Amino acid sequence: MAVAVAVIGKENSPLYVRTVNPSSELKFMYTIHASLDVVEEKVIVGKKSSGELRELYLGLLYPTEDYKVYGYVTNTRIKFIIIVESSYTTLRDNDIRQMFRKLHNAYSDVVCNPFYVPGDTICSKQFESSVKGILIQE
Amino acid sequence: MADDVLFELLHMEMTISIFQPDQSESKRSSISKLEQIGFCTGYRLVERLTKDWPRFKDELDTMKFICKEFWSCIYKKQIDNLRTNHQGVYVLQDNRFRFLTQLSQSKQYIEATPKYLAFTCGVVRGALSNLGITCIVTAEVFSPPTCKFQVQVQRI
């Protein structure tokens, strides 16, 4: 159901980008890049308010004609972006949350690997396979 | 619990194998090596521990997390006292610091304590650095096993 998944580092460098269809990667890169400003804005607003808005999950960042972009920022300022097709209407908010939780679990496993240098691009088979689980669920 | 003991033993072995007491030069470099190991550990560990935690409000909120959750995860107890001057200096006091409890309570071995504190200083620095706070962490001991960690935040 998700068409693209991205992990963006602290200083907004892409650590991992994967799309269902490799030929459309550039287009999604553009969408992801554009969404980073929205992420930043939401984090600043979220910090000021209390309670529920301080969640790691940021919700829908913005809809485009064909896609919806969702965001999530960890406490360590790693950003996760998931893009889903707008036509997929049965998708609930909770499903998206579930996807992000899975992604976060996989990411923290990658970081805890002593051979991974934080800030490098991610090339781990395990991470790859859990991302695949998020991408293809139809 | 058994894994507590294992952690203590592992820390002891690590300290022994890295620390070289012969010359002052290698002494300093081995202390910084221990600190570096701590830094990497803290940096990675905090990624996992903050997974289900709401976003931190500010610096103080982050420090509270370090004192409670982070500390009880590693040392099975919380920090006993946190003090701050609200200008970037935090003092964390642990009245029964785990790596010092096996040491004599007198001042006899006080000169041997730095090597047992270096790892923890690094862990705290690494954790805070991953959470976006650049700082210097130093430790001081007056009478073991009481120990104070001073965190000095570097503001740009």
Image (tube, coloured by chain):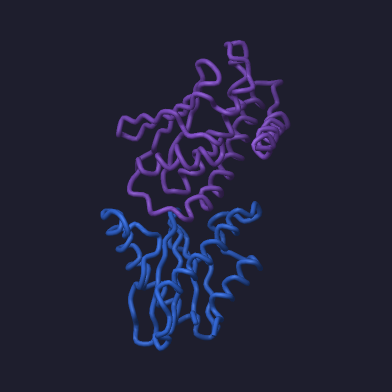
Chain colours: A blue, B purple
Residue at the (54%, 27%) spot, across then down = B97
Q: Residue furthest front?
A: B1
The tally of labels here is: 0
Q: Position of residue B8 (x, y in %)?
A: 66, 33
Classify A132 as above or below A107.
below
Residue at the (51%, 20%) spot, across then down = B141
Q: Position of residue A63 (x, y in %)?
A: 34, 80
Image-quadrant location for residue A28: bottom left
Q: Nearer the viewer, residue B151 or B75?
A: B75
- B62 horizontally vs B103: left or right: left
Image-quadrant location for residue A130: bottom right
Q: Position of residue B136 (x, y in %)?
A: 45, 34
Classify A24 as above or below A110.
below
Image-quadrant location for residue A120: bottom right
Residue at the (40%, 74%) spot, across then down = A93
Q: Nearer the viewer, residue A4 or B146?
A: B146
Q: Position of residue B28 (x, y in %)?
A: 61, 27
Q: Quadrant of the C terminus of chain A?
A: bottom right
Classify A129 as above or below A112.
below
Q: Nearer the viewer, residue A15 or B156?
A: A15
- B58 horizontally vs A137: left or right: left
